[in-house]
Every structure is written in structure tokens, then in C-alpha cells.
């Protein structure tokens, strides 16, 4: 379980069931296609406290451009909704409630993509760090 303050609000993510993770991962792979190689870098930038957050946002926008060339806007919005609604947001009482994309992000779209990145980072960081590690090992072996 992890939480993160994004634009003044605290979001929390808890691990999802393995089958849900696999299904989401499958959707991401299908949608991201050739852009999939960029996702580990976005996650790395988002999790690096010393990295410029703008770099992660630029990388995320590049992925979005690739995604829009592969799917309809409806498929895209449903995927983004399903990702952010895995998070909870802390209300004024201090209680965490499940994110409702329209209730939480209407008028605050600037927080939407940082929450998407946060959710993906928390749900799949071990998967992507494994890929990054395997890629680094492969480069060492090849040289």
C-alpha cells in the first residue's frame, strides 16, 4: 500500500489481485504496442525523487500520442478510467474513498495523468524493474 500527494490531494493505491493485474497488463500491452518500451522510463522518472517531473510528463505525453494512433478515444478513456479508479483519494474527513474519475478530476485534469502514472508505478513497478534489469543485463552480455 502506497500513498502520494498530488496537487494537494492524497491518493492511495493497494495491490490488486493477480488476475486483475494480468488483465490490465494485457490491455496495456495491446493498447501501448510499440510505445510499451517507453513505459518503464516513465515509471522510473516518476519514482525518481531527483528527476524533473516534467520529463515524466513529456514521456507520458509521447506514449499518449502513440496510443491515440492505435485505439479509439472511447477505448482510451475507458482504460484511463479503469486505471485511476484503482486508486483511492482522501476526503476532507481523512477517509479514503474510491476514485470516481468524473467526481475527482473534473476541473482538475492536470492531476489525472500523474495519478495514472502513480497507479501504474505501484501496480507494475516490480514487473517493469525486472524488464529494465533484464535489459541492462542483456546489454552487458552483448558488449
Image (cartoon, rainbow, N blue to C red):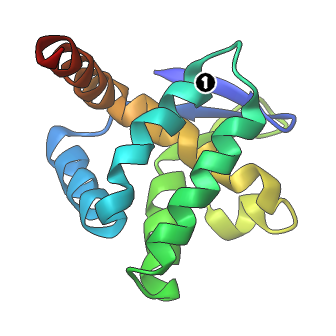
- Picture quarter with the C terminus: top left
What residue sits 52% from the left and 21% below the top?
A: 2
Residue 9's x, y, as percent? 80, 36
> In the image, residue 41 lies at what x, y percent?
48, 34
Q: Is residue 25 left or right of residue 72?
A: left
> 110 and 4: which one is in front?
110
Residue 114's spot in the image, x, y percent? Answer: 67, 44
Asked whether, in this view, residue 30 is left or right of residue 78, the answer is left
Mark 1, residues whose alpha carbon is within 10 Å: few (<14), some, or many (≥20)?
Answer: some
Q: Tell me where residue 54 sits by quadrant.
A: top right
The answer to whether residue 11 is left or right of residue 85 is right
Q: Residue at x 61, y 17 (%)?
A: 48
Q: Is residue 108 above or below residue 116?
A: below
Instruction: Name the residue nearer the viewer: 64 or 27.
Output: 64
SS label for mark 1:
strand
Q: Is residue 85 visible?
A: no
**Does residue 41 lie above or below 50 as drawn?**
below
Residue 13 in view: yes
- Total of numbered circles in the picture? 1
Displayed quadrant of residue 39: top left
Give the residue pinned by disc 1: 3
Front-lying residue, 90 or 39: 39
Residue sitting at x 45%, y 21%: 1
Amino acid at each position: 500500500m502506497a500513498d502520494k500527494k498530488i496537487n494537494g490531494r492524497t491518493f492511495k493505491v493497494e495491490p490488486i489481485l493477480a488476475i486483475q493485474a494480468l488483465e490490465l497488463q494485457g490491455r496495456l500491452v495491446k493498447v501501448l504496442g510499440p510505445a510499451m518500451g517507453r513505459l518503464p522510463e516513465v515509471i522510473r522518472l516518476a519514482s525518481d525523487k531527483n528527476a524533473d517531473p516534467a520529463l515524466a510528463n513529456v514521456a507520458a505525453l509521447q506514449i499518449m500520442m502513440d496510443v491515440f494512433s492505435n485505439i479509439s478515444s472511447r477505448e482510451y478513456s475507458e482504460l484511463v478510467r479503469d486505471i485511476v479508479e484503482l486508486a483511492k483519494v482522501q476526503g476532507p474527513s481523512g477517509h479514503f474513498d474510491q476514485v470516481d474519475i468524473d467526481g475527482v478530476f473534473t476541473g482538475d485534469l492536470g492531476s489525472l495523468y500523474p495519478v495514472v502514472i502513480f497507479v501504474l508505478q505501484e501496480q507494475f513497478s516490480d514487473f517493469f524493474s525486472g524488464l529494465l534489469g533484464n535489459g541492462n543485463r542483456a546489454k552487458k552480455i552483448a558488449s
